[in-house]
Image (tube, rainbow, N blue to C red):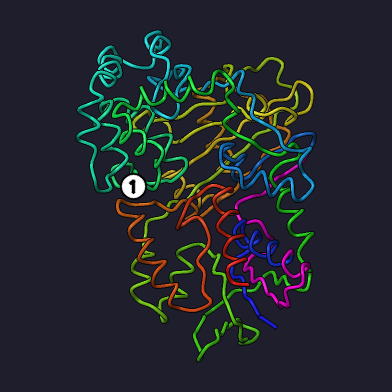
Amino acid sequence: MKRIAIVGGGIAGLAAAYELSRLAGSGAVLEVVLFEASPRLGGIVETVREGGFVIECGPDAWVTEKPWARELAEELGLGDEVMPSNDATRKTYVLMNSQLKAMPDGMRMMVPSDLDALDQSELFSAEAKRAFHDEVNRAAELKSNAPQQDESVASLVQRHFGNEVLEKIGAPLLRGVFGGDVTKLSVRAAMAPFVAMEREHGSLIRAMQIHAAAKDGKQAAVFTTLQSGLGTLVDRMVAAIPKAWIRLGTTVHSISRNHDRWAIRTSAAEEAFDAILMAAPIHVARALLQPIDVRATELMEMDSSSAVVVAFGFPDAVGFSTPPGFGFLVPQGSGSRLLACTFVDQKFAGRVPRNGKLLRAFFGGDAAERLMRCGNDEAASVARLELAHILGPLPEPQVTVVRRWPKSLPQYAIGHMERMKELDERVGKLNGLSLLGNGYRGVGIPDLVRDARSAARRIV
């Protein structure tokens, strides 16, 4: 019998345990223990359902074009729950001079496919609009000068469009996903499709236009979620995993290698395993691996930023309206501590009771670090104040949810892919160890699911 330990019960650890339970059901002879330090499973994926509101405490969706989360949901019998974002009314705003200015239609991140819509936009200066138009004419030059080595996201965006586009759109978009500093963020790790576009077409705008024409108007929604919330994905995986495998409230204090087996020590005991799926946050995994391979832990060293989410459910918001669309981004230097806000009821159907409204405020960076030290009431007061400055007076919420996610956004610094290649080679020599989670090969739910399930199959 093969004994397998999973350290960490977030999405990656759960997906690995679920896959192992499937393999056990197909005849694999396994004994599995999932160690989770907290009293619940799912990590930052959590859904609160109260008073007719469906409130996501962490991620609210996955990127549609990555298939692995949808495949898992359908496998778990949730096919009827899979729901696209309301892309017919998709619009995102940027806070500028205390006003919300709409991003032009047809933009993918900071790259427009519709230059006519761009020209009508109030978001960009005449100089920035000229830079967009010039980018198409510089295709040959941009293609021949495309770097052979990794660079920062800031470098790519500035080279194509200039600093204004980076500050207004590029930086706030990516800070919400990866946290940290776009001048240090690896473009190959964070924006690989754009690197490929530059190599093939030179002009990112031209590449986007070709991509849009090939779709011929049949564009899938950008985001996908579940009608009852992403917490249902967690619940279904937990239900499929043998209860005897799960140990909540159990912190792993150390791991060690004894001959051809692994030892895991908790406050209760030391146990031997044939393999470990390490799905703890990367700073935790790094500390556990330190006595075993110092070079591996050097490769795992990276900045991680914290996030704070505050959601307000308003039951009767007839007199309170938000601009049509999904929400807004806040560039640095805008005078607000917010990083972004989602108009949840406008992004997804079925999230609020009749006449209700649901806002989700998101804080990152220094603001999140300060709010981490505040109580729930104080964090909610700060969020209400920031939102009121931008949207006007808010009604009284029926439901308020505050969640703090310390060190939840790892920053993929320049050279990340090369470091991960070396890390994989080193870990591969430590027979029976796999590293899972958002610090390595992608931060979204689909990436975590794909990685975890393939690691589980490999180990068995």
Q: Residue sitting at 59 percent across and 36 percent down? A: 64
Q: Residue sitting at 25 percent across and 26 percent down? A: 162
Q: Nearer the viewer, residue 301 or 84?
A: 84
Q: Residue sitting at 33 percent across and 73 percent down? A: 295
Span colored in magenta: 22-50
Residue 289, position in %: x, y?
44, 75
Q: Is residue 207 left or right of residue 454?
A: left
Residue 42, position in %: x, y?
66, 56
Q: Is residue 24 magenta?
A: yes
Kind of element beneath mark 1: loop
Residue 85, position in %: x, y?
64, 29
Does 457 sit above or below residue 190? below
Does 270 sit above or below residue 390? below
Classify residue 208 by image quadrant: top left
Please state, as top left, top right, bottom left or bottom right, where the N terminus lies in the image: bottom right
Classify residue 103 by image quadrant: top left
Q: Is residue 64 magenta?
A: no
Q: Nearer the viewer, residue 313 or 11?
A: 11
Q: Residues within 10 Å of mark 1 (few under 14, many from 20)?
A: many
Q: Residue sitting at 40 percent across and 44 percent down? A: 190
* Residue type marked 1: Ser
Residue 317, position in %: x, y?
70, 20
The residue to which callout 1 is attached is 186
Does 184 sit above or below residue 144? below
Does 257 sit above or below residue 148? below
Classify residue 343 by image quadrant: top right
Please state, as top left, top right, bottom left or bottom right, where the C terminus lies in the image: bottom right
